[in-house]
Amino acid sequence: MNSTLLETKNLTYVYSKGTSSQVHAIRDICLKIEKSELVGVIGHTGSGKSTLIQHLNGLLKGTSGTVLLDGKDIWEKKSDIRKVRFRVGVCFQYPEYQLFEDTVYKDIAFGPTNMGLDRDEIDRRIREVIYYVGLDESYLEKSPFDLSGGEKRRVAIAGVMAMQPEILILDEPCAGLDPKGRETILSMIKDYREKTGSTVLFVSHSMEDISKIATKVLVMNESRLAYYDTVDEVFRHADELRNMGLNIPRLTKLFLMLREKGYDVNTNVYTLEKAKQELLALLSKGGTDK
Amino acid sequence: MISDITIGQYYKGNSFIHKLDARAKILLTVLFIAMIFMCKNFLSLGLTFVFVVLSVLLSAVPVKMYLKSLKPIIPIVIFTAVLNMLYTGGETVLYSFWKITLTAEGLTTAAFFAARIVLIIISSSILTYTTVPTMLTDAIEKLLSPLKVFKIPVHSLAMMMTLALRFIPTLIEEIGKITNAQKARGADFESGKLLQRIKAIIPIIIPLVVSSFRRAAELADAMNCRCYTGGNTRTRMKQMKFCFKDFVSLLVFCIGIAGVVLLNIKFGAVI
Ligand SMILES: Nc1ncnc2c1ncn2[C@@H]1O[C@H](COP(=O)(O)OP(=O)(O)OP(=O)(O)O)[C@@H](O)[C@H]1O
Ligand SMILES: [Mg+2]
């Protein structure tokens, strides 16, 4: 059913190789990402998430190992690497610092223009993505430097979405935003995937955020791939996750504890809504089938 | 490309030269450069070369690092050498073709110029590889402090230099990040005509300038918040001390210069 879109084989990368400050940023990563998956990437600071991402669109070339897109090595023809970057769209941490044009419109147009699309198509795409990121057309003529931080970030993300990549990768899209801003970005990611059917990877430091929208979780630990599985499967390893400095969502923890105490509840609870249902179901059963 | 720039980078270490006083190292570098320019024949040049090699070895910084710092200036070296070769007049013609005449004098001058540039780069690299930038500016401030008599704001100048040096790595990192972000949107920096390439830099320059201003404002705020007033009332966390080994090193270099002068007189000048 689901076919593999992006694959890495024994991918390893060493920064400043051969000097006194050499760092093994990722080691031996073997990964298969299927089509239309929404993957949440998590791992402690410095675990190699950003480094891994930069390999997926060929900004970095592995010290050893390969990256396959649709079964083809992305480095097969070096001159085609730009085409790979149009298919795998990456938006970095704090993308608001990449804006440079005098209007939002022109800035979003940068990617599609580089692709060599015609004017009308670019215009159509811009008017489409600006809604994806929860802004409206009145923003298009504003200067990106006059926007608030959260708005700038959304414009930057729109700039990558406008290339209509098959895989959209967002590095910490929620970093430094308030709860409402995070919520907006998360639902924006979810909507985008549902509307376009593309594959999305997003890095986050919050298990809560990931469990809310992701279909799969990718856990990095000390430059290695620890888990890549469904949300439910990964949360079964609560203790291991804690040893990696990560935490499962508080709600899930609560239900795991209830389960431990002998209550008959499902433990795949990540949202308040689901928690309410579970608890009501438990209460209607009498609550205490210990 | 940009990461090849190594001048101004500190290479962590614990060697004899790392431990010398920063002021001594600056003076030594000045002496070194004087020595390089005083060489008038190949023997004195050889002596200077020995000094450079010994210092490089003493610094315990890999030779590879020095080669890296030489790489960007190779074109300049070749260019000056060729110019000198062709435009230095002389009697001993070695080879003549059309309008080009190669003379022994020309070759000698070319060799000297090339050697001088290379030696100067190496000796200044020794200084920057073995000295933390902040120590360097502290030392410059100390060495220039007599100028305060003439109402020159030595402290402010030194602080500006410290900050500038401090932000070089940050800027390089920032350029890398912005470049990556634009590349991810398909920016093409590697192909196209000159004009296109220059235009391709705009998406990097503008965010860089914007964020530099932001950074400068933030830094100014942070310094104000910590009650920075500048000027003479400030004390240092790390006091600089001139020790025995600093004096010895300076002495050795003075002897070296004397050696160069003697060799120049004894064997005559070829340049
Ligand atoms: N440009 C670089 N040069 C040298 N080392 C680097 C560079 N970038 C990252 N590293 C190192 O590689 C390792 C992995 O870094 P990476 O940025 O991939 O981590 P991360 O998981 O994205 O962390 P964070 O959650 O803080 O963003 C770290 O140890 C880091 O110090
Ligand atoms: Mg990161």
Image: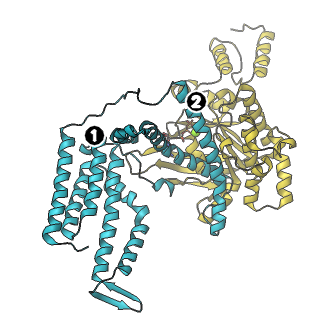
Chain colours: A yellow, B cyan
Give residue B109's position: percent from left, percent from top: 30, 74
In the displayed structure, would residue B7 be above or below residue B155? below
Q: Which mark is residue B253?
A: none
Q: Residues within 10 Å of mark 1 (few under 14, many from 20)?
A: many
- Residue A209: quarter of image: top right
Instruction: Compare residues B265 and B72 and report the one nearer the observer.
Output: B265
At horizontal 36% and vertical 76% (from top left) the residue drawn is B84
Q: Chain of mark 1?
A: B
In the picture, measured across the screen, residue B125 lies left or right of residue B166, that is: left
> In the picture, which quadrant includes the C terminus of chain B?
bottom left
Q: Which residue is mark 2?
A: B221
Element type at marker 2?
helix
Q: Could you tell me if residue B28 is visible in this image? A: yes
Q: Name the amino acid, label 2.
A: Asp
Q: Residues within 10 Å of mark 2 (few under 14, many from 20)?
A: few
In the displayed structure, would residue B44 be above or below residue A202? below
Q: Which residue is mark 1?
A: B21
At horizontal 17% and vertical 48% (from top left) the residue drawn is B251
Q: Could you tell me if residue A77 is visible in this image? A: no
In the picture, measured across the screen, residue A132 lies left or right of residue A46, that is: right
Q: Name the amino acid, label 1.
A: Asp
Instruction: Compare residues A123 and B256 and report the one nearer the observer.
Output: B256
**Dot 2 beta carbon under 8 Å from ligand 1:** no
Of labels 1 and 2, earlier in sequence is 1
Give residue A49's position: percent from left, percent from top: 57, 40
- Residue B243: quarter of image: top left
In the picture, measured across the screen, residue B185 lies left or right of residue B52, that is: right
At horizontal 27% and vertical 86% (from top left) the residue drawn is B91
What distance separates the C-alpha of mark 1 from that of mark 2? 33 Å
At horizontal 39% and vertical 37% (from top left) the residue drawn is B148
Instruction: Compare residues B106 and B127 and report the one nearer the observer.
Output: B106
